[in-house]
Image (spheres, helix red, strand yellow):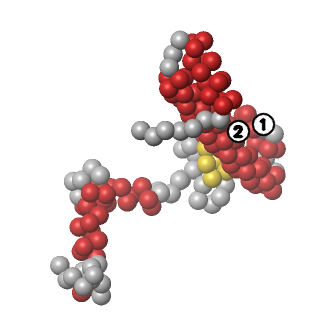
Amino acid sequence: MSDMTLPDNLAVQLTEIARREQRSPEAVLETMFAQYQNVAASDDLEAEDQELEQLRGKFYTRARDYWRRVGDEERLALTDKQLAEQFWLFDQDDIPRLKSDAGSFELLPNPLAGLDGLLADATDATDLSTTIRETLKQSTHPQYGWTKRGRTD
């Protein structure tokens, strides 16, 4: 626990709020801090939402540029709201695809998706971070030119 000195005007305000609500000044401060944290978390979520909307806008602009080049007037006319519901991805050829395109073209497998299976076959660990020390120990053995501060174990 630490002591804090408040300016007189803040101490008076805090004491008045505590008296009016029939609570201790500490309880009032705890409530204020909780409300502040909720507002800060809400602000963070709003900022993330704005960033996501900006990213979507960039994707939609890129998709519209493609549709303009190939003359696809129907897709070019889609609004951002419609694209938010219908847009799926850019395929390996950088062609924008809508959800309705699923199954109408061959989507190459994601090479990272196979990594999950590879790692699952290599270990029974559910949290691969638990095996990192053993993995590093094997790959950084002195035979590979590295020792742990002169140790060779």
Locate the C terminus by quadrant: bottom left
Q: Is residue 133 above or below residue 46?
A: below
Secondary structure of the residue carrying tag 2 is helix
Q: Nearer the viewer, residue 91 or 79?
A: 79
Q: Amino acid at mark 1?
A: Thr
Judging by the rendered image, the residue that carries numbered circle 1 is 79
- State whether residue 38 appears in this view: no
The residue at 24%/53% (across/down) is 125
Judging by the rendered image, the residue that carries numbered circle 2 is 83
The reply, left or right, for residue 30 in relation to residue 77 is left
* Whole-percent x, y for residue 113 in the image: 42, 55
Q: Nearer the viewer, residue 76 or 28?
A: 28
Secondary structure of the residue carrying tag 1 is loop
* Whole-percent x, y for residue 74 in the image: 79, 40
Q: Nearer the viewer, residue 114 or 138?
A: 138
Disc 2 and disc 1 in contact, CB within 8 angstroms: yes
Q: Amino acid at mark 2?
A: Leu
* Whole-percent x, y for residue 152 in the image: 20, 83
The residue at 79%/54% (across/down) is 65
